[in-house]
Image (spheres, rainbow, N blue to C red):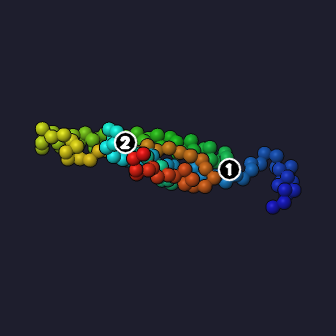
Amino acid sequence: MRSYDKEAFFAVCQDAVPATRSYVSLYADQSYYGGPEEGGWWGHDQVLVAYYLCLTDVEAEAVRAAVEKLAGQMSKDAKDDFNRGCKAECEWVEQHDPMADVSDYYPEVGGEVRYWVATEDRPGSLASEGSRHYA
């Protein structure tokens, strides 16, 4: 496209919105137990859950606001599920082997999933996998 074409369009349509393609992406921060060194250590993976293509910055802002609200609720639900699971494991051990430690039956937990939102040029650009080795 010639720059003249774009300039001519904006001269005629002064309230036009430039097309700026971007993606609103939902990520999950998934923690994991790495190992027992130094009293235990945990890592994090940033996993792309889904993305939505937006053709303007205005659209991206509106979509992001809605997805951020959803991500907040999803994080709360994930935390509640995680806590319920931990409680159920503790109660099971108390009922079946009151003298045992929970870790005698269940592995160390990683933690609840936390969701977050990003606006990016390429979907998945912020995805990452944490190190599985103690440093």
Residue sitting at x 36%, y 47%: 34
Q: Secondary structure at mark 2?
A: strand
- Residue linked to disc 2: 41
Residue nearest the observer in this picture, 94 or 17:
94
Q: Is residue 40 above or below residue 13?
A: above
Mark 1 / mark 2, whichever is N-terminal: 2
| Amino acid at the residue labelled 2 | Trp
Task: Give the residue number, with chain letter if any, for mark 1.
Answer: 56
Q: Quadrant of the C terminus?
A: top left
Question: Looking at this view, is 134 or 95 the one in front?
Answer: 134
Residue under the image location 40 percent in, 39 percent down: 76
- Specify the quadrant of the image occupied by residue 38: top left
Residue 61 in the figure: left or right of residue 2 = left
- Quadrant in which the N terminus is drawn: bottom right
Can residue 8 be seen here? yes
| x, y percent for residue 21 | 67, 54
**Side (left or right) of 35 relative to 103:** right
Residue at 60% x, 47% y is 119
Q: Quick check: 116 above or below 53?
A: above
Q: Amino acid at mark 1?
A: Thr
